Amino acid sequence: MKKYINKTIQSLLTLSILLGATACGDAYLEDVDRYNIDSESYFNSEEDYYNALVGAYDLLQSSYVNVMLGEIASDNTLAGGGSAVDVPGFQQIDDMIHTPVNSNLRDIWTWMYAGVNRVNFILEFQDNTDFPGRDIIIGEAYFLRAYYYFELVKWFGPVPLKQTRFELGDETTIPRSPVADVYKLIQDDLKYAVEHLEYTAPEVGRVTKGAALALLGKAYLYQKQYAEAALVLDRVINEGPYDLVADYDSIFENDGENGIESVFEVQYTDAEGAGFECLQCSEGNVAVGFNSIRTYDGPLFDSGFSFNVPTQEAVDAFEDGDLRKDVAILDIENWAATTGATYGTGYEHTGYFNRKYLARKGDLNTGDQNLTNPNNYRSIRFADVLLMAAEAYNSGGIDDTKAQTYLNRVRERAFGDTAHNVTSTGAALTDAIAHERRVELVGEGHRFFDLVRTGKAAQEIDGFTAGKNEVFPIPIEEIQFSNGNWEQNPNY
């Protein structure tokens, strides 16, 4: 399942399922009839379930914008781009002046709900037909619904919940569920997935028991349920087939995809074309082209649009001797001086680029090379699991020694020795773990949400207003469609 492509299911399941525009901008009313598929005309064979599952996976590829904005909203990067008005939604979020009128936030809402609805389509008819491997497909579906809802609750707080397909009129009758209720569904879905999946997937790129456990541990961590988080993350560490690779650099090259450190990756391919009129239709990682070096000419990399540029503060967060720095951050001036490469400078040019997710030469990049990069997104890495477990053991007051052990596994790879191991406890250890998450995971979309859930966003992010910016506004179109059923998030 390297590519999440299935033309039949895509023709039946266009994107804007809930309250808004379709995949390419048509009014959602025009596509309602496409969802009037029942058990008599579909879900009568293993192939039907598999094709529907491919359609449910497909929306993961649209989460490229979630990853980019998880960095841009934080203190790790600036929006960049070509000018101060290049993708205004990015610029507004970077400056923390975003409003409910923001097309990029609406994309996150619409695309993640499209994923929910595709999953709910499967789960409505999960008992329709029996066949070998059915439990695995249904387990994957539960994981995917949890994944999409987890993104929605992270970004928007209370959101509408439904466990069957959304229908016209739901927006005026279904309330926004409290955050605790959203997490309850996420946790229940993931527990089901854990019970029905194995550590080895039927195909590379599909969900495993380890991915379900890791996301469950993450959901517990976000809810400050530290004992529960520690328990399930320990299972990933001790039961799963995962380990840290010796060479940090190898993780982010094509031959490092789906390797021993990968717990869950969003799969991308460069074999399908794409265009700006329908970015979510791309099977490639759009973020890679957006992150890449403006008007670049030189070895190894391809050019791009110079968005999401690392700040000097993020670069300076790396300690002396940290081998990850040159993997995570490309210093373009030093690179050009060494290789003879040339490049242009975009808006808010810092001299740095997110090297983990830069376009590489040699990729096929069918169609627009900036929209069809094949770089998988490493959504959950084993290093992330170790650091989440360390946080759970420390912040929950459970076992600082075990927290140190997990933290230092990550640091020993980063420095190539044990001389940089952390021996502190208590609050100092908490700070050390937070620091390690920043430098280990920089460029991977986690920083903003780490700062929010640990209560540090207001002191670290310029323009962040406590009591407001912990979540993002519900898109104005959704508020309008709800006809007074949904209130906007506070202070927007």
Image (cartoon, grey):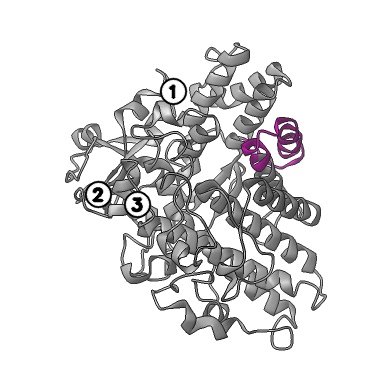
User: What residue sits right under mark 1 in the picture?
Assistant: 322
Q: Which residue sits at x=36%, y=41%?
A: 355
User: What residue sits right under mark 2 in the picture?
Assistant: 81
Q: Which mark is residue 343?
A: none
Q: Nearer the viewer, residue 1 or 276?
A: 276
Q: Earlier in the sequence, mark 1 or mark 2?
A: 2
Q: Residues under labels 1 and 2: Cα distance?
A: 29 Å
Q: Residues under labels 3 and 2: Cα distance?
A: 16 Å
Q: How many labels does the image show?
A: 3
Which residues lie in the magenta part? 218-243
Badge 3: residue crowd in 10 Å (few <14, some 14–19, many ≥20): many
In the rendered image, residue 115, in percent from the top left (x then y), is placed at 57, 64
In the rendered image, residue 244, in percent from the top left (x then y), is placed at 60, 34
In magenta segment, residue 113: no
Amino acid at dot 2: Gly
Residue 133 appears in the picture as rendered:
no
Amino acid at dot 1: Asp
SS type, badge 2: loop
Judge whether 144 appears above or below 459 on screen.
below
Q: Earlier in the sequence, mark 1 or mark 3?
A: 1
Judge whether 490 appears above or below 245 on screen.
below
Q: Are marks 1 and 2 in contact (CB under 8 Å)?
A: no
Q: Nearer the viewer, residue 132 or 167?
A: 167
Q: Which residue sits at x=69%, y=24%?
A: 396
Q: Is the magenta stretch mostly helix, strand or loop?
A: helix
